[in-house]
Amino acid sequence: MNNILDYLDWRGDVPISFDGFNEVDNLLLSELSFLDLAGIVPGMDEEGDVVLCDAAQRYFARTDGKEPDGAWVLTEKIPRLFARMAAAPRFASMRLSMFEEQHDEQREQQFAALCFEVGDGTVYVAFRGTDNTLLGWKEDLNMSFLDAIPSQESAAAYLAYAAQRFGQRRLRVGGHSKGGNLAVFSAVYADGAVQDRIEMVYSNDGPGFLRDITQTAEYRRVARRILKLVPQSSVVGTLLEGEHVSQVVHSNAIGVMQHDGFSWEVCGTQFVHLAQASAEGKWFEQTFDAWAAELSAPQREAFADALYGVLTSTGARTLSDLNAEKLKSAVGILKSYKNLDRETRRALSGALALLLRVGAQSAVQDTRREGERELQELRKRLETQLPKKTE
């Protein structure tokens, strides 16, 4: 299967000015927003910018080429992507600016964004999705009972500031996972003059909204410029979804791991499009809709607070910390929550079971990757030990 890394081999030497911006370019830029670029890309209140290839050089000098602490299955390949993009003429000269990052335990907020001057006169505003922190996932859970979470408010303010900073430049707005949700929210609630400058809004498997914003006048003004991409068995992208129509793309992963943008199949300058979601994807959407209808807003809030409390009480601060032992401990801690009603307790039990299942899938993938590395090392040793074939 060909993915976004293969796309760089095909199109990386073709300038944007020759072959225009496309949906695959969008995912590549949104993935880079997951990197810690503080001190490398000028901040939101700083002047200036940095060329992408220079930013990559500084990033790898700082990290010594190692994966960032707490890297997990959905972000571990992004540094490699960054290096490949820095070597590709299509992306190397893009200018990066306005890096902003906020982690606020008190407000239960995890937010980051940056801007890319694409090279065709437009600016791509990229919002980071949910990172590896439990705080980030708690904010996602808060979407199920809050009309607006702190990151959505920050995204709207960020887009307004970026629009002012770049004068009358045309804008593209996008993100992966929660970043896609933030992109849509910021565009929908932007000033009318800013909305007029938006070329496209990209939600790459981003969740929907508690309130169906598709029925609002603000949404209708930008609706035709919103492209939502979801894999065939999407889990995240179907959460809290209203009536917005999504473009289904093919992923070679299983279940929840289809959320990984590196698993999306690429053909030419677009993803491989499918006519409809898989039976599994439809089943999950129906199951979540039934769960959402079953729990009231106060019950969803109790669910979110209890799940976050249970997971953090194990000592975990990131998803990577949640090994099988900690998750089993969390199941035990759940028994101490006496004040939860039956429906909320059942939802919590189901969420912990899903985490255990996802953890098992990740463990299998980690084992497979480790096995592949060992095979490669064995081949190298054999090549050096075997006698050279003589002519």
Image: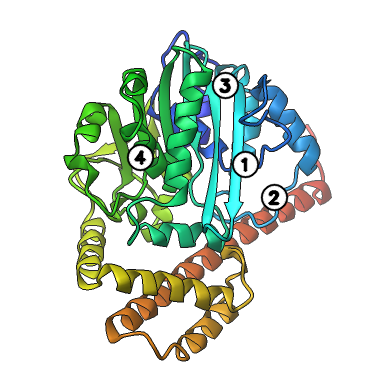
> What residue is shown with label 3?
91
Asked if residue 278 lies left or right of residue 330, the reply is left
Inspect the image, locate mark 1, and give the three-letter code of the amino acid beneath it.
Leu
Q: Nearer the viewer, residue 46 or 284?
A: 46
For the residue carrying disc 3, how many other residues have a C-alpha within 10 Å: few (<14), some (14-19), or many (20+)? many
Q: Nearer the viewer, residue 7 or 389?
A: 7
Q: Nearer the viewer, residue 253 or 229?
A: 229
Disc 3 to disc 4: CB gap under 8 Å:
no
Q: In this view, does 240 lie above or below 94?
A: below
Pinpoint residue 250: horizontal percent, then vertical percent: 33, 43
Name the quadrant of the C terminus. top right
CA gap between label 3 and label 4 equals 27 Å
CA gap between label 1 and label 4 equals 22 Å
CA gap between label 3 and label 2 equals 22 Å
For the residue carrying disc 2, how many other residues have a C-alpha within 10 Å: few (<14), some (14-19), or many (20+)? some
> What residue is shown with label 2?
68
Mark earlier in primary sequence (4, 2): 2
Q: Please give the name of the residue rendered at 51% of the width and 14% of the height, measured from the top-left corner.
A: 14
Report the mark closest to the observer, 3 or 1: 1
Disc 1 to disc 2: CB gap under 8 Å:
yes
Secondary structure beneath dot 4 equals helix
Q: Which disc is residue 185 wearing? A: 4
Secondary structure beneath dot 2 equals loop
Q: Please give the name of the residue rendered at 21% of the width and 57% of the height, measured from the top-left corner.
A: 282
Inspect the image, locate mark 4, and give the three-letter code of the amino acid beneath it.
Phe
Secondary structure beneath dot 1 equals loop
Name the quadrant of the N terminus. top left
Pinpoint residue 113: horizontal percent, then vertical percent: 54, 37
Inspect the image, locate mark 2, and give the three-letter code of the amino acid beneath it.
Pro
> What residue is shown with label 1?
35
Mark earlier in primary sequence (3, 4): 3
Pinpoint residue 29: horizontal percent, then vertical percent: 51, 31
